[in-house]
Amino acid sequence: MSDRAPVTDEDRLIYQLTLHRDLVGWVIRKLAEAGIPSQRTTGNDPKGDILIVAAKDASQVEQIICDIHHQYNRGSIKDAQSNLKERKTDLPHIEIKTTYLSGKAVNEIIDTATVIGVVSADKNSAPGKAKFITAGIAYAENIPLNEFLDV
């Protein structure tokens, strides 16, 4: 007989929220290391999870996200993000995800006009990556949990 209680839906939700909180904090620290001011938005902000305080920093933020992607995804033969078109917005945001991104979730991010970058602890679907690039959204995926999880 096991001493462990079964994992409940509440346990899974707490874990996902913890992952999200810690990944947001990790990205904010990465931006701060580069001298880019940013701030966490309120929960479920439709514009994105992290606000880039100065819109002029948007292209540098996109480059940082691409660099993060390449740090954890060395298998990319061609850098499809190297010619990313700039996505114009006065309120640039980064969206943080902790689960696999595809289909409707990708489209919802693209439809959010303020999102210039996506950082995900999991993978993005191949069609999702192509859609992000076409929309001018930088992405980083497969961020290892041990890089950002503070628990």
Image (cartoon, rainbow, N blue to C red):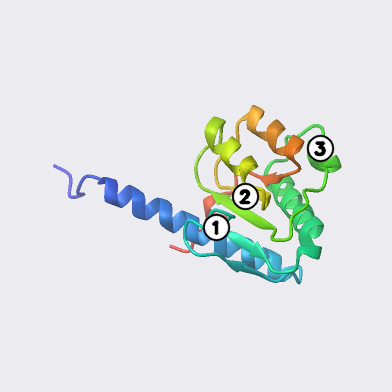
Residue 52 location (% of width, % of height): 69, 64
> How far is disc 3 from disc 2 in space, using C-alphas?
17 Å
> How far is disc 3 from disc 1 in space, using C-alphas?
24 Å
Q: Which residue is mark 1?
A: 23
Tell me which numbered mark, 3 or 2, is placed earlier along the sequence.
3
| Kind of residue sitting beneath label 3 | Asp
Front residue of 77/16: it is: 16
Q: Which residue is mark 2?
A: 119
In the rendered view, tell whether residue 98 sits above or below residue 33. above
| Kind of residue sitting beneath label 1 | Leu
SS type, badge 1: helix
Tell me which numbered mark, 2 or 1, is placed earlier along the sequence.
1
Q: Please say whether residue 29 is visible from this viewpoint.
A: yes
> Is label 2 in contact with label 1 (beta carbons under 8 Å)?
yes
Q: Mark 1 Cα within 10 Å, few/some/many (few <14, many 20+)?
A: many
Task: Indicate which disc residue 107 carries.
Answer: none
From the viewer's perspective, is the residue at label 3 or at label 2 nearer? 2
Residue 80 location (% of width, % of height): 80, 35
In the rendered structure, the answer to whether residue 80 lies left or right of residue 139 reads right
Q: Which residue is mark 3?
A: 79
Image quarter where the C terminus lies is bottom left
Question: Who's the residue at 64% across and 32% down the image?
Answer: 128
Image quarter where the N terminus lies is top left
Q: Please say whether residue 123 is visible from this viewpoint.
A: no
Question: Who's the residue at 68% across and 45% down the image?
Answer: 139
